[in-house]
Image: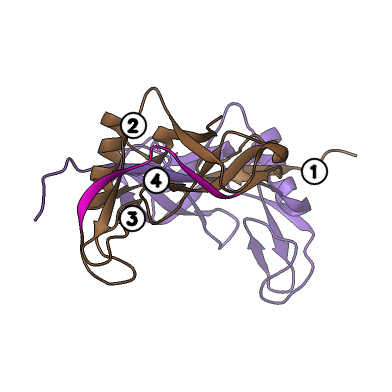
Chain colours: A brown, B purple
């Protein structure tokens, strides 16, 4: 039997958005100085990373910039072994890869990012991790390639 | 207090590849275009109309359809629009035109690209013909576009 006709289609939807006043400073610092910047609530002093203009607890403005990390603590993690379509590339991200919540030193919030470890026996909550920066940084969150366990 | 910051514009995209089976009716439609450069419709004997693109069931009377007929290749432009702005997803550089083409032998119209014509020269009711791809792949863009029939 002849192979049935298949229609192949690729929907590509490119878009741009403004990082805003706080996001812009955050990404500029990443790109230029490899510094991870947070912003502190003027009332409760929680340090938000990524930065945001208003505290989610107090609704008070966040004004004071502080550097956080670069090291932090692994709070939770998973190893992704199921390959699925990454909408940013339209391709499957090669598996396995580690993924986890990182609380940077000095920050009140957690970042979700890639972990440079896929062996469960080497992963546990509370591990110290540090960011691995890209050589050629472009001013976006991928300027941090991943977090690596501090041995 | 606002410090000056260099504004950052982030570029992102969603890219979603997928495949689907054309099904027996659309498969024949595309194969006829690719192999024989013929545009086929399918006739509903009960409603006495030719569906193009063809489909297996009449949307009006729900009859099963199997009576294939060739339509066109010439047709009449019954409506069009000219696109003046540039978007990454668009198939041509602006200005370009989309047209509704009613091929001879059917009352249905096909939405497709218009080409080989300066957009300012496009007129309602003009006669058009399909321009086929030289290396057909089996989809609707095996017709590259419709262009005016030379000599009117």
Query: In the drawing, does residue B4 fall left or right of residue A141?
Result: left
Q: Read off the chain for label 1.
A: A
Mark positioned earlier in the residue sequence (4 or 3): 3
Q: On the same chain: label 4 and label 3?
A: yes
Q: Main secondary structure of the magenta part?
A: strand
Q: Which mark is residue A105?
A: 4
Tell me the SS state at disc 2.
Answer: loop
10 Å crowding of disc 1: few (<14), some (14-19), many (20+):
few
Label 4, label 3: how many angstroms apart (C-alpha)? Answer: 12 Å
Q: Which of labels 2 and 3 is toward the front? A: 3
Q: On the same chain: label 2 and label 1?
A: yes
User: Which residue occupies 31% across, 55% down?
Assistant: A47
Disc 4, disc 1: CB below 8 Å?
no
The image position of residue A18, as x and y in percent, is 27, 49
User: Which residue occupies 28% across, 44% down?
Assistant: A26
The image position of residue A107, as x and y in percent, is 37, 51
Mark positioned earlier in the residue sequence (2 or 3): 3
Q: Which mark is residue A48?
A: 3
Q: Which residue is mark 1?
A: A4
Classify A19 as above or below A133. below
The image position of residue B48, as x and y in percent, is 68, 70
Q: Which mark is residue A138?
A: 2
Q: Which residues are magenta?
A: A63-76
Mark positioned earlier in the residue sequence (2 or 1): 1
User: Which residue occupies 53% across, 33% down?
Assistant: A148
Q: Nearer the viewer, residue A33 or B110?
A: A33
The image position of residue B39, as x and y in percent, is 63, 46
Q: Which mark is residue A25?
A: none
B91 inside magenta stretch: no
Q: Nearer the viewer, residue B151 or B49?
A: B49
Q: Is residue B95 visible?
A: no
A69 inside magenta stretch: yes
């Amino acid at each position: 039997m002849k192979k049935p006709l298949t229609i192949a289609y690729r929907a590509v939807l490119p878009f741009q958005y403004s990082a805003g006043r706080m996001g812009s400073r955050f990404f500029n610092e990443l790109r230029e100085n490899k510094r991870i910047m947070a912003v502190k609530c003027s009332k409760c002093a929680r340090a938000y990373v990524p930065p945001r203009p208003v505290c989610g607890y107090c609704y008070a403005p966040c004004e004071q910039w502080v550097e956080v990390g670069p090291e932090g603590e692994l709070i939770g993690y998973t190893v992704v072994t199921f390959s699925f379509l990454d909408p940013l590339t339209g391709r499957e991200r090669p598996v396995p890869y580690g993924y986890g919540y990182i609380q940077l030193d000095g920050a009140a919030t957690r970042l979700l990012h890639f972990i440079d470890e896929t062996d469960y026996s080497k992963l546990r909550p509370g591990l110290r991790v540090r960011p691995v920066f890209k050589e050629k940084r472009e001013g976006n969150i991928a300027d941090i390639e991943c977090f690596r366990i501090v041995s | 207090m606002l410090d000056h910051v260099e504004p950052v514009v982030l570029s992102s995209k969603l890219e979603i590849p997928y495949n689907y089976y054309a099904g027996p009716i659309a498969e024949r439609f595309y194969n006829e275009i690719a192999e024989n450069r013929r545009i086929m419709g399918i006739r509903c004997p009960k409603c006495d109309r030719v569906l193009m693109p063809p489909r297996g069931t009449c949307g009006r009377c729900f009859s099963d359809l199997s009576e294939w007929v060739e339509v066109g290749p010439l047709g009449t432009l019954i409506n069009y629009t000219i696109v003046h702005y540039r978007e990454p997803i668009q198939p041509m550089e602006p200005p370009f035109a989309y047209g509704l083409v009613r091929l001879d032998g059917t009352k249905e119209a096909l939405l497709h690209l218009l080409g080989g014509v300066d957009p300012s020269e496009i007129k309602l009711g003009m006669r058009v013909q399909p321009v086929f791809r030289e290396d057909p792949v089996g989809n609707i863009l095996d017709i590259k576009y419709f262009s005016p029939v030379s000599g009117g």
